[in-house]
Image (tube, grey):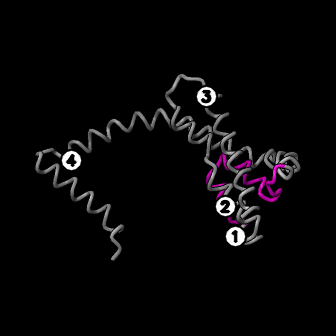
C-alpha cells in the first residue's frame, strides 16, 4: 500500500487523538467554524457569480474569437503558436474552459507535438487571474487594477518563456 495514501487519514486520526487528550469538544468546534464560514460565502458569492458570468459572455459573444484572430500574428511573432492563442486568452478567465481547450489541442495535435507542449506549458504556467482576484479580494476596499495587471503580465510572460523553452528543448 502507498504510504502517501495513508497520510491524510493518519493526520485526521492524530488530530482527533490530540483533541481528545486536550479535552476539546470536536463537534462544537466544528459547528462554530461552520457558522463563521457562512458570512464569508455570502460576501464572496456576488464576485464569483460576476466573474463566471463575464467569462461565459466573453466566450459566447464571439469576443474571444475576434480577439484571438486579432492577436494571433502578435503571438506568432513572440513565439507562441497561433493555435494556442484561444487557450492563452481564456486561461485568465476560466479554468474549465481552458481545460476543454487544452483537451481539444491535445486531440488535434497530440501532447508530444510542439503545439501540445506549448499548450501544456501555457495551461500550467497560468492562473485564472480574475477568479482568484474575485475570491481573494472580495471584501477588500483596495484598488485591484495593479495586482490584476501584474498577474496578467506574469501569466503572459510565463507563456512566452515556456514556448521559447519548448522550442529550444
Mark 2 and mark 3 lie on one chain; the one further toward the N terminus is: 2
Report which residue position mark 3 lands on: 144
Mark 2 and mark 4 lie on one chain; the one further toward the N terminus is: 4
Q: Nearer the viewer, mark 4 or mark 3?
A: 3
Mark 2 and mark 1 residues within 8 Å of each other at the beta carbon: yes
Residue count near mark 4 (Cα–Cα under 10 Å), binned few <14, some 14–19, many ≥20: few
Mark 2 and mark 3 residues within 8 Å of each other at the beta carbon: no
Cα separation, mark 2 vs mark 1, equals: 8 Å
Cα separation, mark 2 vs mark 3, equals: 28 Å
Q: Quadrant of residue 9?
A: bottom left
Residue count near mark 3 (Cα–Cα under 10 Å), binned few <14, some 14–19, many ≥20: few
Q: Nearer the viewer, mark 1 or mark 3?
A: 1
Q: Quadrant of the C terminus?
A: bottom right
Magenta part of the chain: 78-105
Mark 1 and mark 4 lie on one chain; the one further toward the N terminus is: 4
Residue placed most toward the observer, 102 or 53: 102
Please state the horizontal and vertical placement of residue 22, each as a whole percent of the image: 12, 45
Q: Residue at x 13, y 51 (%)?
A: 20
Q: Secondary structure at mark 4?
A: helix
Q: Nearer the viewer, mark 2 or mark 3?
A: 2
Residue 120's mark? 2
Q: Secondary structure at mark 2?
A: helix
Report the side of 17 relative to 154 (left or right).
left
Mark 1 and mark 3 residues within 8 Å of each other at the beta carbon: no
Amino acid at each position: 500500500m502507498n504510504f502517501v495514501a495513508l497520510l491524510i487519514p493518519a493526520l485526521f486520526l492524530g488530530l482527533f487523538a490530540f483533541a481528545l487528550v486536550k479535552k476539546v469538544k470536536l463537534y462544537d468546534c466544528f459547528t462554530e467554524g461552520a457558522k463563521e464560514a457562512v458570512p464569508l460565502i455570502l460576501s464572496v458569492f456576488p464576485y464569483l457569480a460576476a466573474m463566471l458570468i463575464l467569462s461565459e459572455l466573453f466566450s459566447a459573444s464571439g469576443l474571444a474569437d475576434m480577439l484571438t484572430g486579432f492577436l494571433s500574428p502578435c503571438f506568432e511573432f513572440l513565439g507562441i503558436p497561433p493555435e494556442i492563442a484561444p487557450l492563452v486568452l481564456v486561461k485568465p478567465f476560466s479554468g474549465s474552459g481552458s481545460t476543454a481547450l487544452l483537451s481539444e489541442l491535445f486531440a488535434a495535435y497530440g501532447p508530444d507535438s510542439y503545439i501540445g507542449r506549448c499548450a501544456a506549458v501555457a495551461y500550467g504556467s497560468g492562473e485564472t487571474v480574475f477568479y482568484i482576484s474575485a475570491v481573494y479580494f472580495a471584501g477588500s476596499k483596495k484598488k485591484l487594477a495593479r495586482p490584476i495587471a501584474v498577474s496578467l503580465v506574469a501569466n503572459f510572460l510565463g507563456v512566452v518563456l515556456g514556448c521559447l523553452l519548448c522550442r529550444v528543448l
